[in-house]
Image (tube, helix red, strand yellow):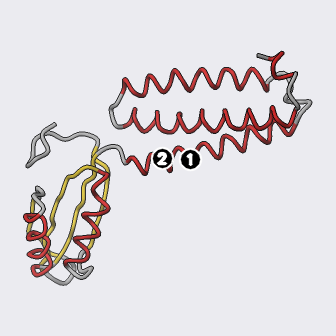
Amino acid sequence: MSEFLTSIHPIAVCFIVCAAKIVEITIQSLKTCMMVKGQRLKAAGLGFLECTIWGLVISTIIGTLGDNLFLLLFYCVGYATGLFLGSTIESKIALGTSNLELIAGDESTEKIIQYLREHNRGYTVFDGYGSTDRMNMIFIVLPRKEAPKVLKDIRAVCDNKVFVVASEVSKYAGGYGMMK
């Protein structure tokens, strides 16, 4: 591998290292998300690929790092770009499950419940008290990929008269339409 790289112009090597680092760190970001979400087999496969790329990249730069600071710069740019790209891809594929906790008054609660029933969504409602009024808390557990649309729709049906806390769910069992 080193013979091949010595035959290439040093700037081209910088771009190759940068591209490989982008791919490696993007894979690393996705692998970490899959581990957290319990997708161990996929994470292991990505980990193997990540380690292979890392070994090739590090063996390319370790001997020449002191002689070529551009190589270090491109390595660092590749790392940062890979982190950005990996987190962007993960947010698009939206692995996992979300929990929406909504706090609303009676009128908004009725509109939210109507929306949830029309869209065949499971929910749980609790009575409560806010700092000034009686309020309701509505729990909804749904695939993370669907959470932004459901939240946007709910905010629209109740004219934004709802307080929302969204969080990720690592484990759950049972529930309406959510057996896992």
Residue located 31% across and 44% down the image: 96
User: Can you give x and y, in whole percent of width and height, for residue 64 in the image?
Assistant: 86, 26
User: Can you give x and y, in whole percent of width and height, for residue 77 in the image?
Assistant: 72, 44
Using residue 56 as the reference point, say whether residue 127 is left or right of it: left
Mark 1 sits on what residue? 85
Mark 2 sits on what residue? 89
Using residue 117 as the reference point, say whether residue 23 is left or right of it: right
Q: Nearer the viewer, residue 103 or 16?
A: 16
Figure check: 99 above or below 110 = above
Residue located 15% across and 78% down the image: 108
Tell me, yes or no, whether the two marked residues, 1 and 2, touch with CB atoms within 8 Å: yes
Residue located 29% across and 63% down the image: 149
User: Can you give x and y, in whole percent of width and height, for residue 78 in the image?
Assistant: 69, 41
Figure check: 38 above or below 122 = above
Using residue 57 as the reference point, say whether residue 157 is left or right of it: left
The local secondary structure at tag 1 comes to: helix
Under mark 1, the amino acid is Leu
Within 10 angstroms of label 2, few (less than 14), some, or many (20 or more) residues? few
Report how many numbered discs are placed on residues in the image.
Answer: 2
User: Can you give x and y, in whole percent of width and height, for residue 87 in the image?
Assistant: 50, 47
Q: Nearer the viewer, residue 11 or 90?
A: 11
The local secondary structure at tag 2 comes to: helix
Residue located 79% across and 24% down the image: 62
Specify the farthest residue to the right.
67
User: Which of the image's four quarters has the N terminus?
Assistant: top right
Within 10 angstroms of label 1, few (less than 14), some, or many (20 or more) residues? some
Under mark 2, the amino acid is Ile
Figure check: 83 above or below 21 = below
User: Which of the image's four quarters has the C terminus?
Assistant: top left
Q: Quadrant of residue 129?
A: bottom left
Q: CA distance from mark 1 to mark 2?
A: 6 Å
